């Protein structure tokens, strides 16, 4: 589902993997929304990202996230 906000910000629900996760994506961990602040590459295609929590995402991991896109 995509949404539109009056300040020209587009919000989209996306499925993310280790290959597609981006800084700024918002995921829910334990019911709390966490924004991806930084990404670290690990062996076998895994990534670790820091959003107040540390989470390792392996190549086959699939997560639902909210991605905010600003229109220009």
Image: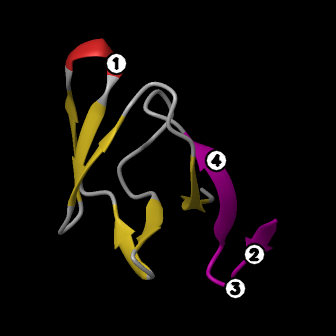
Q: Which mark is residue 15?
A: 4
Instruction: Please identify, in this view, whether the residue under mark 3 or under mark 1 is nearer the observer.
Output: 1
Task: Residue at the far top: name it.
Answer: 44
> Is residue 2 in the magenta section?
yes
The residue closer to the viewer here, 26 or 56, is 56
Q: Residue at x 38, y 31 (%)?
A: 58
Sequence-first tag of 3 and 4: 3
Q: Quadrant of the C terminus?
A: bottom right
Q: Residues within 10 Å of mark 3 (few under 14, many from 20)?
A: few
Sequence-first tag of 1 and 4: 4
Q: Are marks 2 and 3 in contact (CB under 8 Å)?
A: yes
Please tell me whether mark 3 sits on a helix, a strand or a loop.
loop
Q: Which residue is mark 3?
A: 6
Mark 2–mark 3 Cα distance, whole angstroms, equals 7 Å
Q: Which residue is mark 2?
A: 4
* 26 relative to 69 in the view: left or right: left
The residue closer to the viewer here, 9 or 63, is 63
Please tell me whether mark 1 sits on a helix, a strand or a loop.
helix
Q: Residues within 10 Å of mark 2 (few under 14, many from 20)?
A: few
Instruction: Please identify, in this view, whether the residue under mark 2 or under mark 1 is nearer the observer.
Output: 1
x%, y% of residue 26?
A: 45, 65
The magenta stretch spans which residues? Answer: 1-16
Please tell me whether mark 4 sits on a helix, a strand or a loop.
strand
Determine which quarter of the picture holds residue 70.
Answer: bottom right
């Amino acid at each position: 589902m995509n949404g539109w906000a009056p300040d020209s910000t587009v919000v989209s629900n996306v499925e993310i993997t280790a290959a597609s996760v981006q800084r700024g994506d918002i995921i829910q961990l334990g019911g709390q929304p966490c924004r991806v602040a930084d990404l670290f590459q690990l062996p076998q295609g895994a990534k670790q990202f820091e959003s107040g929590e540390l989470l390792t995402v392996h190549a086959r991991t699939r997560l639902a996230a909210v991605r905010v896109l600003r229109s220009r």
